[in-house]
Image: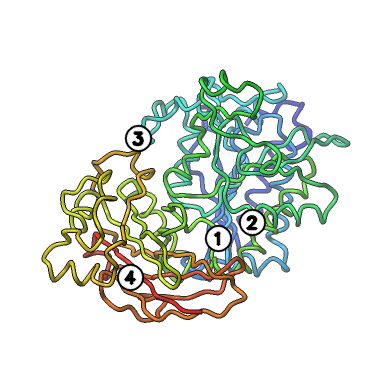
Amino acid sequence: MTEPSCNKVFSARAYENLMRKAASSGFGRLEIPGKSVEGDPVYALTLSDFSVEDDLKFHILIAGLHVGGERAALLAFRDAIRFLLRKSSRKYLERFAITLMPVVNPYGCFRKTEDQYHLNSSGYDMYTGRHGKSFHYPELSLVDPEHEPELAAFCKVIDQVKPEILLDWHGASGLPGTTMRETLGASLSNHLITPWGTRLLAAMRQEVCKGKSAVFDLEEYLERIPAPPEYRAMYPSRVRPSNAVFYPDLYATIRYHAMPIVMEIGQAETGWRALKGLMDYALNPPPEYRGSLPVDHVGVDFGAIVASSHGKTPGERRRSRCELQEKSPSFLTFYLTPMRIGEVGAALVLGNSGKQIMAGDLLLREMARHAASEFPAGEPACRRKLFGKLSEQSRLLPLLANTNYSEDIPDCGTLQEGICLQFFLPVGHRRNLRITECLLNGEKMAEGEEDGYELVRGSDGWHLFLNLSPKRTRHERLFHVLVHYEF
């Protein structure tokens, strides 16, 4: 690769030497998922303890999508690799597989002399993806992979890794004595990414601030909302709007429900400190996360029921999460009203066929007229089994926001990887609580991590998790839950 003389901060030769040295450490695996238009390799380096089964690890992908002139990000990648290969970091390599793609755009990074050059030689920007025009929708295939092979390599790695977290690192310029205001958040760029896992972001910021620098809290200050032109015209200058276009880093979210975190880096140590904060949090999460990261909650309504991934290991949950994300357009949730003290009820159905099992041909918008005990759930005996314990006043109402108020819910196959249905019980965690009865489709459920319920005293209240194994979900399209508890 020809090196412009201006690349004094981090040369192509130094970069390649770093990749190969890390790969030879015994804890690295170097792959070339694609090449640039010129044939320069787009590297993907995975650091992990490969003697530990992959299913026991979380997957983190860290990418520098354009990095033209953003040398501080490159230096952060260098220091993150050095940090992960320390002897003191072995505990992280046993629990995580960290894949790094420091230079997705070798042309903009190493072949161009201009600062902040973000295009490849075909004139395509890896970061913006031509403001969403790089993809076919809804299948998310690339429109022009011949002229965007670097972006194709990035998407290929996402498909392989299916990360829990995608870290997108930026940072200009990295020259000695220079810095920039450092930021960390889930909605940094000119597009809207719904932020979640705010406690995780706070833990990362806290670790960064133990070092030389401090990081700006984007989520707290930006106040971005999706703002269409009509809204902006009615209320000008009242909010900071976002241009809700599809950027390539959203590919991991739409496909696999990965949590995207974007960083602007001024000091090289900010990268590895943020990564350390993330991993430390994952090793000791709040009890209601049950040893996982905040990406398990795939289908969420407004508190009645949450569709979460199933499994005991990160790998099992990853496979379940990816399936749930793919099939989530077919989820329709119902909530039991009125909510009575000591009782919680809800239902999740898969598509029209699941809804028909529960409520026949009733229109969703008319369900409020019918008591749940009147639902035509199969034969009368089945109806009594499902709804016999509900009072005449009880209603199971659909959360129509899931469907954009459409009566036609797309069908999907049954769940092959299981599901966990989570309920937040309205009782403070300082009070003692016990479950007196947990019913699924009228069947009494016992406690169990694989197929049964778990009651967790969380940091924010009581949580009930109903774990439904693949053996069960492969034959069901209706999940009606009725729980009684006392405190």
Report x, y in % for residue 90.
66, 68
Tell me the tag on residue 138: 3
* In-front residue for pair 83/417: 417
Residue drawn at the location 27% of the way across and 54% of the way down: 350
Please tell me whether mark 1 sits on a helix, a strand or a loop: loop
Position in image of residue 391 (x %, y %): 29, 67
Amino acid type of the residue tagged 1 in the rendering: Leu
**Residue that badge 1 annotates:** 293
User: Which class describes the residues within 10 Å of circle 4: few (<14), some (14-19), or many (20+)?
Assistant: many
Quadrant, the N terminus: top right
- The Cα–Cα distance between marks 1 and 4, rounded to whole angstroms, is 20 Å
Cβ atoms under marks 3 and 1 closer than 8 Å = no
Residue where numbered disc 2 is placed? 200
* Mark nearer the N terminus (1 vs 4): 1
For residue 414, which numbered disc appears in the image?
none
Secondary structure of the residue carrying numbered label 3: loop
Q: Amino acid at mark 4?
A: Ser
Residue extending farthest left? 379
Mark 3 or mark 1: whose residue is earlier in sequence: 3
Q: Are marks 2 and 1 in contact (CB under 8 Å)?
A: yes
Q: Kindly give the residue lying farthest to the top in the view shown.
A: 233
Quadrant hosting residue 288: bottom right
Q: Name the kind of residue labelled 2 in the image.
A: Leu
Mark 2 vs mark 3, CA separation in Å: 30 Å
Toward the viewer: 344 or 115? Answer: 344
- Secondary structure beneath dot 4 equals loop
Decide which of tag 4 and tag 3 comes sooner along the chain: 3
- Position of residue 291 in the picture relative to residue 2 (left or right): left
Circle 2 SS class = helix
Q: Which residue is mark 4?
A: 469
